[in-house]
Image (tube, rainbow, N blue to C red):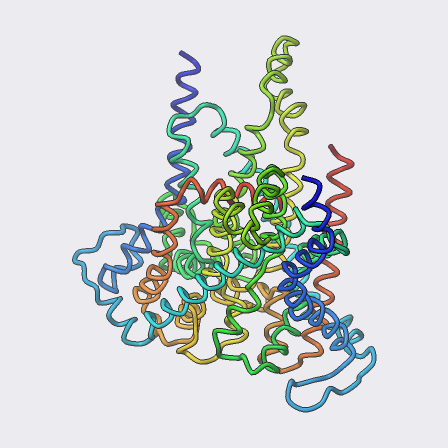
Amino acid sequence: MKFPAVINIGGEQRAGHMLVAPYYIFFAMFLAYPLIFSFVLVFHRWSIVGPLEWVGLSNIFELGGDPLFWKSIGNTLIFLIIHVPLQVGFALVLAAILNSKIPAQGVFRAAFFLPVVVSGVAVTILWKQMFSTNLGILNQVLYEFGIDPVPWVTDPSWAMPSIAMMATWKNIGLYVVLFLAGLQGIPKHLYDAADIDGASTVQKFFHITIPAINPVFMVVLILSTLGGFSLFIEPYVITGGGPMNSTLSGVLYIYRQAFSFFRMGYAATIGFALAIIVMGVIIIQRRFVEREV
Amino acid sequence: MKSKIKKIFLISLLAMLALMFIYPFFWMIGGTLKPEIEVMNFSPFGSSWSLDSYRIMLGKIPLFRALFNSIIVSLVSTFSVLVLSSMTGYALARLRFRGRSLIFNVILFTMVLPFQLTLIPLYVLMVKFGWVDSYAALIIPYTMSAFAILLFRQFFMQIPNDLIDAARIDGLSELGILFRIFWPLSKPALITVGIIHFMGIWNEALWPMIVVRKLSMMTMPQMVALYAVGGQAESQVGTQLAAATLMSLPIIIIYLVLQRHFIASMATSGLKG
């Protein structure tokens, strides 16, 4: 047994690098080069045809004073403030109900999960019609309850919250499944011990359930935050970024600067800024969650 | 008695909520079969039914061409991710070579790298390669995935060493060990990566919208999105819903068949990611 292991030392070195070779190429082409080039673009003006033109820090200064960029960040924050608590709260409640020995658990879980697998484009086209102020089925239902029609996506103050609601509907199944996996991993004897000590259901929820699923909570928080900063097709199809730029998202703004105005340098600068903000928000959330629980 | 009432209450609550998640899809499919003036009615059933919405929509956009493109792109990319990412995952899990832990850390780092950062330079790269409007642009940037590599690595670390030793004595190459011994033992990992990657690329809209302009090279999400937004649909809602339905059906059918695998895969994806 020792013999083959000895000849293998050189062989293993070579085999290792050979098996990883596709990744070396992939990394160099699609990660390292774009990262470096993105940094270079920040300091240039470029319409993709013709040479790069050095502009120093002017892209960064322009970004700092660009009301549309800050509007897109503000819109994203509005989205997150509505979407994240809705998502986490509802998903946790649904998972808790599903976890309590309900018959046909699998059927319910499958139903909540259905929108997760369907393309965002299809879901968005569907909801665009459901959101229609005069004809949409959402307002038809509200009418039955005597509620006035809501201008879901035609009013600037409603549009982003509406999209946040739709995104919650689309993604909640995934988070239900994640929470459910977390809940099912909690050892049952913890609850039995709490029962002996006379703990109430609410106490058990806050002192056993919540701390035990803290890692899942962090994952849900990160995924839904990333989702918020990746919004593109939803505003693109439903509102085109309007009304009055109230649903302009960061990625939609990059897309516009790059492919409507051909400003590659500025678009790359927005991408850079967005990436820094995303990572910043996630680091803050991480600190906050770790301190809280 | 009290717990029974509570249970009935919970089940009816869940049933109502479940309906809220399923009904819109019934309404969507119903809307494609109803006469155009009844599309917006709450009921999914119309006074008569026809396939006119599909006929009109298919007369305006080559959706079956997009279906073909989507199938090619999704299958080739998923196959490549399974092969290439499992190779890297195998090397990281089972072979000792210089730089291994550095590569592992680099892959971890790329997983948290926001895509907004590399979007524009990647597009520029496609232009420089002359890949705009080609399968190469749609597939090659999606031939490997950091998530897949990490998942394979973790899975492969649990496979007993004896199997590798025995295979090496039998003269099997490392690739032989990976594909003949590890793959058959790693069905759960292969299924998880396959489902997640296939679903992601089948539904991807942003990247195709950046690198494809030609109608004949579009995948379904892009073609359907442009149809709904670009005015071609002429505000005929039924035809837009028909396009959305045809795009969703393949993935819904796959989901209904492989439901358990889908849900289990997504659960691991979140917890590992």
Q: Is residue A290 left or right of residue B70?
A: right
Q: Which quadrant would residue A36 be assigned to in this image?
A: bottom right
Q: Is residue A10 visible?
A: yes
How many badges with numbers are in the image? 0
Instruction: Specify the quadrant that holds the C terminus of chain A.
Output: top right
Residue furthest toward the front? A3
Residue B20 horizontal/vertical position (percent): 40, 43
Q: Which quadrant would residue A44 be assigned to in this image?
A: bottom right
In this rendered view, identify the residue nearer to me: B102 or B165: B165
Residue B268 horizontal/vertical position (percent): 56, 42
Q: Is residue A40 left or right of residue A207?
A: right
In this rendered view, identify the residue nearer to me: B57 or B63: B63
Q: Which quadrant would residue A105 be assigned to in this image?
A: top left
Q: Is residue A225 above or below residue A121?
A: above
User: Residue at 42% of width from left, 38% of height from top?
Assistant: B17
User: Residue at 63% of width from left, 32% of height from top?
Assistant: A213
Residue furthest toward the left? B48
